[in-house]
């Protein structure tokens, strides 16, 4: 008799989406849909339990509608005798959520653990047979420290599969943008000897350890272009105590964020579209649900046309439609006009022209070096004035092009 459950985390319900104001409500609706899809998945798969590893809510400011929606979704699980174990994270720590706890307290199979006190329960299947043991602990405050994990017990000696549910920051992983709350090391978790540790906090899905199995499910819906790729939950099956579980990713996200970086000198929208299309051909997936950010870089004849926000927005909508994308954003901050240095020079007197003239004078060998007091130049102590001049002249190479880019807003 194996123990089967769905591991999800970091929904951040009611999160203000960080992309565009006017789409924020639609995003919040999408988040609720993703939760509903997760519940549908749990019901369809007839799992024994759903583990929510913290940051289910973005903050204690949960709208009444979302509160009601959350209740209704967890009620669907409870009605089918599927256990929900929801431990709180740094975004939804216990102290602020008494109202929600009272509400969820009406559901017999829903357990919300909002304090720094381990909570254990034996999960049973619909025939009443024990299939596994869940142990979870919540965040009480938004800033749990190093000692938090030390309050968590090792797995018990039962013959049943042992599973832990925690919202914690494993510190010996690749760098990530999430705060260092409830920090712990991989070995701290592995030494607790659970068959599976369901983690929340880091939004990038990842296997922390194969066995004891420790996983971040990641968030089921990316919230901005930094949270890219396919996202969802993990369906886990533990056949018996002491055996490595089977972990299967199941996509849930309604929207998918992707990003491409383009460098080029497209002459018009058609060329730009074709460049995006070529990149997209190498990326599998159904693009109708994609939110694609295209970061444009380098010199381009389109730089000026794309600097006007309304025109850019219009083009974004037009290209999204043409490319079959859910949404498209053109980030044109890295673009600059593509005039050559000769073209810039021909425009008449300017600081750029003066700089060009100085470069010319230096190249012709006019002695402009002496007044610059070259004495302290590092690495050239003891060199003759000629050697110094030679070295300095080598710095002039490519300087006109660099300056042209700089004077057109491209940075140096
Ligand atoms: Mn968190």
Image (cartoon, helix red, strand yellow):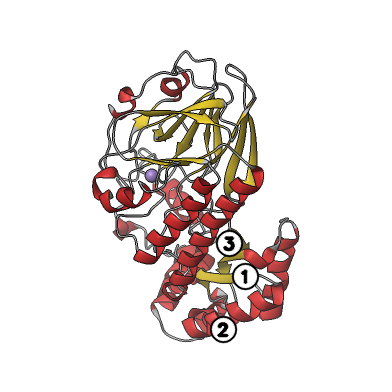
For disc 3, the marked residue is 255
| Image coords of residue 50 (percent x, y) | 52, 41
Which class describes the residues within 10 Å of circle 2: few (<14), some (14-19), or many (20+)?
Answer: few
Q: Is residue 263 visible?
A: no
For ligand 1, tell me if the residue under mark 3 lies within 8 Å: no
Give the alpha-carbon distance from disc 1 to disc 2, as whole Å: 15 Å
Tell me residue 340's x, y (percent): 57, 75
Q: Rounded to the nearest whole Å, what is the CA distance between mark 3 and mark 1?
A: 8 Å
Percent from the top left, x then y, of residue 391?
A: 47, 49
Q: Nearer the viewer, mark 1 or mark 2?
A: 1
Residue 125 higher or lower than 287, as above or below: above
- Residues 334 and 331: in front is 331
Where residue 326 is drawn, which disc sits there? 1
Q: CA distance from mark 2 to mark 3?
A: 21 Å
Q: Earlier in the sequence, mark 3 or mark 1?
A: 3
Which of disc 2 and disc 1 is earlier in sequence? 2
At mark 1, the secondary structure is loop
Going 74% across and 64% down the picture, which residue do you hit? 278
Image quadrant in which the C terminus is located: bottom left
What percent of the width, then of the height, locates residue 251?
Answer: 63, 50
Contact? badges 3 and 1 (CB < 8 Å): yes
> Dividing the image into 4 quarters, which one contains the N terminus?
top right
Q: Give whichever of discs 2 and 3 has the lower sequence position.
A: 3
CB at disc 1 and ligand 1 closer than 8 Å:
no
Observer-nearest of 253 and 106: 106
Tell me: 138 left or right of 363.
left
Contact flag, marks 1 and 2 (Cβ < 8 Å): no
Looking at the picture, does residue 174 appear above or below residue 317?
Answer: above
Residue drawn 62% across and 22% down? Answer: 244
Q: Is residue 405 above or below residue 248?
A: below
Horizontally, is 392 left or right of 36 in the view?
left
- Name the residue tied to disc 2: 314
């Amino acid at each position: 008799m194996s123990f089967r459950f769905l591991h999800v985390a970091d929904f951040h319900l009611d999160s203000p989406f960080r992309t565009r104001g006017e789409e924020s409500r639609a995003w919040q609706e999408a988040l609720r849909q993703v939760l509903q899809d997760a519940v549908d998945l749990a019901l369809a798969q007839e799992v024994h339990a759903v583990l929510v590893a913290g940051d289910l809510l973005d903050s204690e400011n949960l709208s009444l509608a979302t509160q009601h929606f959350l209740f209704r979704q967890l009620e669907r699980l409870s009605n089918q005798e599927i256990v929900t174990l929801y431990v709180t994270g740094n975004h939804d720590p216990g102290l602020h959520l008494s109202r929600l706890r009272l509400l969820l307290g009406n559901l017999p199979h829903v357990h919300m653990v909002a304090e720094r006190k381990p909570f254990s329960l034996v999960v049973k299947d619909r025939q009443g047979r024990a299939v596994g043991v869940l142990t979870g602990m919540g965040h009480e405050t938004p800033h749990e420290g190093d000692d938090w994990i030390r309050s968590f017990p090792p797995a018990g000696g039962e013959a049943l599969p042992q599973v832990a549910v925690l919202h914690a920051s494993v510190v010996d992983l690749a760098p990530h943008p999430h705060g260092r709350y409830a920090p712990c090391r991989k070995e701290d978790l592995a030494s607790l000897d659970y068959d599976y540790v369901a983690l929340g906090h880091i939004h990038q899905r990842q296997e922390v350890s194969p066995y004891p199995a420790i996983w971040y499910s990641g968030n089921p819906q990316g919230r901005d272009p930094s949270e890219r790729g396919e996202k969802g939950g993990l369906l886990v099956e533990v056949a018996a105590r002491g055996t490595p579980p089977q972990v299967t990713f199941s996509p849930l996200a309604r929207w998918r964020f992707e990003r491409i970086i383009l460098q080029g000198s497209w002459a018009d929208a058609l060329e730009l579209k074709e460049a995006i299309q070529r990149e997209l051909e190498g990326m599998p997936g159904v693009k109708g649900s994609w939110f694609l950010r295209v970061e444009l870089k380098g010199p381009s004849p389109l730089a000026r046309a794309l600097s006007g926000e309304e025109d850019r927005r219009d083009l974004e909508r037009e290209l999204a439609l043409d490319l079959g994308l859910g949404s498209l954003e053109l980030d044109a901050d890295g673009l600059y006009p593509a005039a050559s240095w000769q073209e810039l020079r021909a425009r008449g007197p300017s600081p750029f022209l003066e700089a060009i003239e100085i470069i010319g004078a230096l190249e012709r060998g006019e002695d402009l070096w002496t007044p610059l007091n070259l004495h302290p130049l590092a690495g050239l102590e003891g060199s003759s004035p000629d050697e110094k001049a030679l070295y300095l002249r080598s710095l002039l190479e490519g300087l006109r092009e660099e300056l042209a880019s700089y004077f057109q807003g491209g940075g140096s």
